[in-house]
Each structure stands twice: as structure tokens, then as C-alpha cells.
């Protein structure tokens, strides 16, 4: 005997009584908004259903979301969201159970989506070598009176997703923790990182502490699956690259 499960429980069952794994809010939290249907996303915006009235049974938020989509569906049943987004608020309120507050929230969400679609992606700078890193960072770091430790979060194309200032230290050292390097890297889904710090004294020669720190970060990067692509030290007239010197592999 084969048991067939339905991804959305029957409409007459209250959402509160659905299995936790099938509730729209829980599914969004676990799987992301892309895993939800348009009806489920609308139900999250509608939030509350409608009590029984005038001989009509109670309607859940999911029921109302389905009613709204069907109300604006053309003959083929497609493009309901486009029609809803173009409709005036009063037209949405013609759907039983959809009042001005629910209608305003739905139109606001659809317009936010439209505005997001119009936004262009930021132009990302690619750092393909230690020289690229140095040219990006030298003017900001070479004249600082104290050490600063920065992290460049890179994607698979070695484009900078974000630059993070991890610490601003004293004249001759910075206190660095691996968690402060890799927490933002994990949040941005970075493929790798480049760590950068300056030597206020001018010469970029790595100290024993620099080497030990690099070793610790390389180990931590392997553990979390975000490798350290390089460690670049910025000096007055040049830079030192652990990758170019072959130290990353040895450390």
C-alpha cells in the first residue's frame, strides 16, 4: 500500500493544527522563502483568517491567500501576482476577508519586490593577486599610527563581497580571534578570505606572531571550509604576501 502525502494540508484544517514542518513560517525559516509557493507567501502576509459569518465556514490565512489568487487569475490561472500588484487597494478589498490593512501589506510587499528587481548589482572589485590587495589597501593603511587588521571576503571569482575591520590595535600588535574573521565570512557565504594588516614601522617583514596568527587562521579556515587565500602585510613602500612567499602551505 502506497501512502501519498500532501505538501499542504487540506484547507479546512486550521494552520495551527498543521504539522510544524508544513507550516509556512516554519518552512521559510528552515528552507528559505524560495521553497514556498505564492499562496504560502501571501498567507504569511495575511497572517490571520476570517471567522465564520453569514453561513460561511471559517477561512484560514491560507484559504484567503488562495481566494485572492483565484480572484485575480486570468483564464489560464497565471500572472495573478502581477495583476494583484497593479490593482488598487480597493480592488483587493473586494475579496471577502481581505480588509484595507491586509491589502496594504500585500501591495507594499509586492512593490518592494518590484523595487528590488530594479536595483542593479554592485560592481565588485576583483583581487587576483597580492599586488591587487596591496593597491586596494595601501593608501588606507600605510600611514596608520597603529596596527589594523582587515579581512576581505571573496567569492569564487575572487571578487570582494565585503571588507571587514576586525581590530584596531596598539602601536605594535593586534588581538585577533578566528571567530571574528570567519563569522562575517560565513554570514556572507564567502568562498575564501584574504587577511590584511599593516606595520606602522614601515617594513612589512612578518614577525613570529604574524606567522603564528596566520597558521591559526589557516587551520580555522580549513575547519569551516573557508580557506585563507593570502595574508598580506602592508608597509610604507611595499607589501609582504604569505602566499607569494610560499608560507601558507608550510604553515
Image: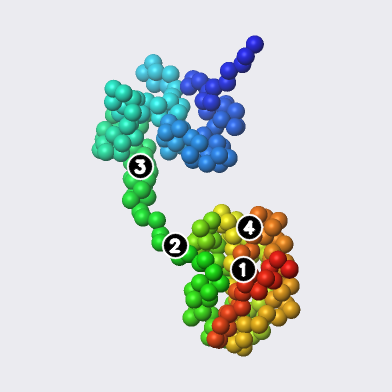
Report which residue position mark 1 lands on: 230
Around disc 4, counting alpha carbons within 10 Å, would you say few (fewer than 14), some (14 to 19), or many (20 or more)? many
Q: In front: mark 3 or mark 2?
A: 2
Around disc 1, counting alpha carbons within 10 Å, would you say few (fewer than 14), some (14 to 19), or many (20 or more)? many
Q: What is the secondary structure assignment of the residue under circle 3?
A: helix
Q: Residue at x 40, y 56 (%)?
A: 121
Q: Residue 248, percent across and down?
A: 68, 68
Q: In front: mark 1 or mark 4?
A: 1
**Which picture quadrant has residue 188?**
bottom right
State the CA–CA distance, disc 1 to disc 4: 12 Å
Q: Is residue 121 left or right of residue 137?
A: left
Q: What is the secondary structure assignment of the residue under circle 4?
A: loop
Q: Is residue 89 above or below residue 192?
A: above
Q: Residue 60, percent across and down?
A: 46, 27
Report which residue position mark 2 lands on: 124
Q: Earlier in the sequence, mark 3 or mark 2?
A: 3
State the CA–CA distance, disc 4 to disc 3: 36 Å
Around disc 2, counting alpha carbons within 10 Å, would you say few (fewer than 14), some (14 to 19), or many (20 or more)? few
Report which residue position mark 4 lands on: 226
Please state which of residues 232 and 66 is positioned toward the viewer in this rendering.
232
Amino acid at each position: 500500500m502506497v501512502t501519498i502525502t500532501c505538501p499542504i494540508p487540506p484547507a479546512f484544517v486550521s494552520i495551527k493544527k498543521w504539522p510544524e514542518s508544513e507550516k509556512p513560517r516554519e518552512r521559510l525559516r528552515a528552507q528559505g522563502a524560495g521553497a514556498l509557493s505564492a499562496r504560502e507567501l501571501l498567507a504569511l502576509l495575511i497572517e490571520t483568517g476570517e471567522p465564520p459569518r453569514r453561513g460561511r465556514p471559517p477561512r484560514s490565512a491560507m484559504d484567503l491567500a488562495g481566494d485572492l489568487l483565484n480572484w485575480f487569475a486570468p483564464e489560464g490561472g497565471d500572472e495573478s501576482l502581477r495583476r494583484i500588484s497593479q490593482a488598487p487597494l480597493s480592488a483587493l478589498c473586494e475579496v471577502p476577508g481581505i480588509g484595507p490593512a491586509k491589502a496594504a501589506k500585500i501591495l507594499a510587499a509586492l512593490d518592494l519586490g518590484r523595487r528590488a528587481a530594479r536595483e542593479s548589482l554592485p560592481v565588485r572589485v576583483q583581487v587576483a593577486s597580492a599586488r591587487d590587495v596591496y593597491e586596494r589597501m595601501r593608501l588606507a593603511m600605510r600611514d596608520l599610527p597603529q596596527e589594523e587588521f582587515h579581512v576581505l571576503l571573496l567569492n569564487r571569482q575572487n571578487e570582494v563581497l565585503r571588507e571587514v575591520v576586525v581590530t584596531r590595535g596598539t602601536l605594535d600588535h593586534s588581538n585577533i580571534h578566528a571567530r571574528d574573521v570567519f563569522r562575517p565570512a560565513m554570514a556572507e557565504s564567502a568562498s575564501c578570505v584574504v587577511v590584511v594588516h599593516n606595520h606602522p614601522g614601515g617594513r612589512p617583514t612578518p614577525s613570529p606572531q604574524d606567522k603564528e596568527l596566520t597558521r591559526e587562521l589557516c587551520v580555522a579556515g580549513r575547519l569551516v571550509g573557508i580557506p585563507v587565500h593570502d595574508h598580506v602585510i602592508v608597509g610604507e613602500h611595499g607589501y609582504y604576501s604569505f602566499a607569494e612567499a610560499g608560507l601558507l602551505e608550510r604553515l
